[in-house]
Structures are given as structure tokens and as C-alpha cells.
Image (cartoon, helix red, strand yellow):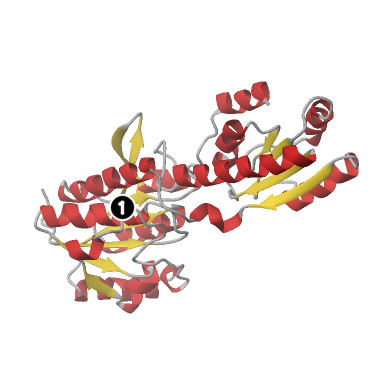
């Protein structure tokens, strides 16, 4: 057991449903073990400016169901510099913080890893990103909720598509990761999905659309925003040129995928991660990310989580091909 007395907790980067549940779990676990907890607002920006406050049980009352993050989040260019990190460390010392829990994605963990290297302060990461693109964990906080948001939207879009015999191209988030598009495509019964990780040859898509033209009244194509050919509107333009007979429409779901009440799965996952983060720090762990593999809690070095890209499950791609 290490001599930790005050844990600083912060959220950084893009928000994800379930971040509040993770904050709650960190605070309640730390207080259970008679540790102090300091909330750092606005991520690394707040760490630099000293925007921090002591957290109590009252601080996390009635937040487990809320989307977003009560600690707010922001990106910080200043923290990328050594001078910015020095300012942040001085503020942590001023507030008596001797360990950190970082809640976020790869950018958050990159900063936390470098910060830990520079100053030797213990830090544990909690993965919270709707993209589910961190190596070493089967799931990240926010992914399940985002998937359910996408699926509900696609189901509603299909109602309109069937009523008007339309082809709908639905663009979902995922600049570098196609995890959302892949699973949503299977669950929604999409004709095809287009992913950043896969070189997109349009000929198979054209063949599939030609075949489905004769026996399906509605067609759904799900596109990750970061796939190589372009976003939903560019794909729509190409398809319209190839199939002018289609009534083609494009729907960009955008930031609605980040919001909303976290699902039961995300609330439970965030709670498990929050407890494991505090207990990991107490055990002397540092510069590791809490993850879950095959339902078990694991700890993964931060540099492994952020430097190795997540891998698509090729069996899931096969399912899309078989069932489309």
C-alpha cells in the first residue's frame, strides 16, 4: 500500500455518457478508504489554472444517470508544453494532490503518461470514449450508450425509408475507428458499412445495392465519418451518380451520439472502473489504464493503450456480409 492522501480526478477530451458515473465511483471509493478527493475542472486547463475543489458525497449526489461530465472538459494546448506541465504540477502541489485519476481517451492518456514520466506522480486512467478505440480493454465508457443512440436513430430512419422506398446513408462518429459503424450496422440490418480501417472498394457496394434494388423497399448504408472516400454526403453523391433511380438521402447523426443518459451497461462499467482506479493507486500502480477483458478487470500500461490501434473483429465484418 502506498502513502496516498489526496486523489485528483478530472475528465478530458471529448465527453462520453458514463463519465459522471465514473467520477461518482472514484469519489465514493476514495472517501470509503478515508482519502481526500479533489475535483479538477476543465481537464488539463483547470489543472494549469488551479480550478480545483474538494469533493464530498454531496458533490456526486444524483449524477450517476446524467450524461456529460460535471467536472467539464476542455482541450489544452498549453499542457502540451513543458512549461504548461510545470504550471500544472505546481498547482497540484499547492492543493496537496499526490495522485491522479484521468478519465478520457487516447489524448487524455497521452498527456497523463508524459506527466507521470516528468514528475513521478501516480496516475491511473479510466477509458471513456464512445469510439471504443483503446487497446487493452474490450469496452470503454460511453460506447454502449452511443451504440444505442445510433441504433434508435437508424430504426426511426428506416421507418421513413420504407415508407418512401429510399436509400438512407447514415454517417456516424469514428474518425479513426469504425467500431460504432460496425456494430450498429449488424444490429440495424444495414446493407453495408464503410469503415476507416478498411480500404473501401465501391464495386462490391454497387453490386449489393443493385441486388437489393429488386427485393428490398428500404436500404440503409452506415458510414464512419473518417472512412477514406469521404463522409456521408460524398458517398451519397457517388451513389446518386451511379444509381439515379434511387431516392437517396443522407443523415449525419453528429454530436447527438455523445449525449443522453448512460445505459445500464455504461453505468456499471464506469462504477467498476472507478473503484478499480482508486484501489490500483492504493496498491502502488501508476501510469496504467483500468480495462475489462472477458468481464474481468485488468490494468494495462498507458503507453500500450495509446500507441497500439484497436483491432476490428473480422468475424463481425463477415456477419455484416452474410446478413446484409
Instruction: Give the residue number, with chain letter if any, for mark 1.
Output: 22
Q: Secondary structure at mark 1?
A: helix
Question: Seen in the image, is 96 located left or right of residue 160?
Answer: left
Q: Is residue 317 above or below residue 202?
A: above
Q: Nearer the viewer, residue 176 or 15?
A: 15
Residue 141 place in picture, x, y as percent: 40, 47
Which quadrant holds residue 219?
Answer: top right
Quadrant holding the C terminus: top right
Q: Residue at image x 71%, y 32%?
A: 191
Q: Residue at image x 44%, y 40%?
A: 135
Q: Nearer the viewer, residue 133 or 87?
A: 133
Q: How many marks on residues?
A: 1
Residue 310 place in picture, x, y as percent: 50, 39
Direction front: furthest residue: 163
Direction top: furthest residue: 322
Question: Seen in the image, is 107 located left or right of residue 200?
Answer: left
Residue 116 place in picture, x, y as percent: 30, 59
Q: Does residue 59 show up?
A: yes
At label 1, counting other C-alpha atoms closer than 10 Å, the crowd grade (few under 14, some 14-19, many 20 or more) is: many
Residue 296 place in picture, x, y as percent: 29, 32
Question: Seen in the image, is 86 located left or right of residue 30?
Answer: right
Amino acid at each position: 500500500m502506498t502513502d496516498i492522501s489526496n486523489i485528483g480526478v478530472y475528465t478530458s477530451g471529448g465527453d462520453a455518457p458514463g463519465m459522471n458515473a465514473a467520477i461518482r465511483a472514484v469519489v465514493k471509493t476514495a472517501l470509503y478508504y478515508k482519502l481526500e478527493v479533489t475535483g479538477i475542472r476543465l481537464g488539463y486547463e483547470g489543472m494549469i489554472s488551479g480550478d480545483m475543489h474538494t469533493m464530498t458525497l454531496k458533490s456526486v449526489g444524483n449524477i450517476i444517470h446524467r450524461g456529460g461530465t460535471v467536472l467539464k472538459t476542455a482541450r489544452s494546448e498549453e499542457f502540451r508544453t513543458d512549461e504548461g506541465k510545470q504550471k500544472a504540477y505546481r498547482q497540484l502541489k499547492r492543493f496537496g494532490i499526490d495522485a491522479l485519476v484521468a478519465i478520457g481517451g487516447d489524448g487524455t492518456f497521452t498527456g497523463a503518461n508524459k506527466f507521470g514520466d516528468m514528475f513521478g506522480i501516480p496516475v491511473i486512467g479510466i477509458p471513456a470514449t464512445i469510439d471504443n478505440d483503446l487497446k487493452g480493454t474490450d469496452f470503454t465508457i460511453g460506447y454502449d450508450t452511443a451504440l444505442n443512440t445510433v441504433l434508435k436513430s437508424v430504426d426511426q430512419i428506416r421507418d421513413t425509408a420504407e415508407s418512401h422506398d429510399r436509400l438512407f446513408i447514415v454517417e456516424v462518429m469514428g474518425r479513426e475507428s469504425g467500431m460504432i459503424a460496425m456494430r450498429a450496422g449488424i444490429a440495424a440490418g444495414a446493407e453495408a458499412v464503410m469503415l476507416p480501417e478498411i480500404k473501401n472498394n465501391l464495386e462490391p457496394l454497387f453490386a449489393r445495392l443493385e441486388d437489393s434494388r429488386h427485393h428490398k423497399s428500404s436500404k440503409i448504408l452506415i458510414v464512419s465519418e473518417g472512412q477514406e472516400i469521404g463522409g456521408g454526403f460524398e458517398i451519397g453523391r457517388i451513389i446518386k451518380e451511379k444509381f439515379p433511380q434511387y431516392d437517396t438521402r443522407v443523415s449525419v447523426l453528429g454530436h447527438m451520439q455523445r449525449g443522453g443518459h448512460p445505459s445500464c451497461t455504461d453505468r456499471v462499467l464506469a462504477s467498476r472502473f472507478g473503484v478499480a482506479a482508486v484501489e490500483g493507486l492504493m496498491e502502488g500502480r501508476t501510469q496504467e489504464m483500468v480495462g475489462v477483458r472477458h468481464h474481468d478487470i485488468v490494468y494495462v500500461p498507458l503507453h500500450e493503450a495509446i500507441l497500439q490501434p484497436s483491432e476490428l473483429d473480422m468475424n463481425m465484418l463477415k456477419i455484416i456480409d452474410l446478413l446484409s
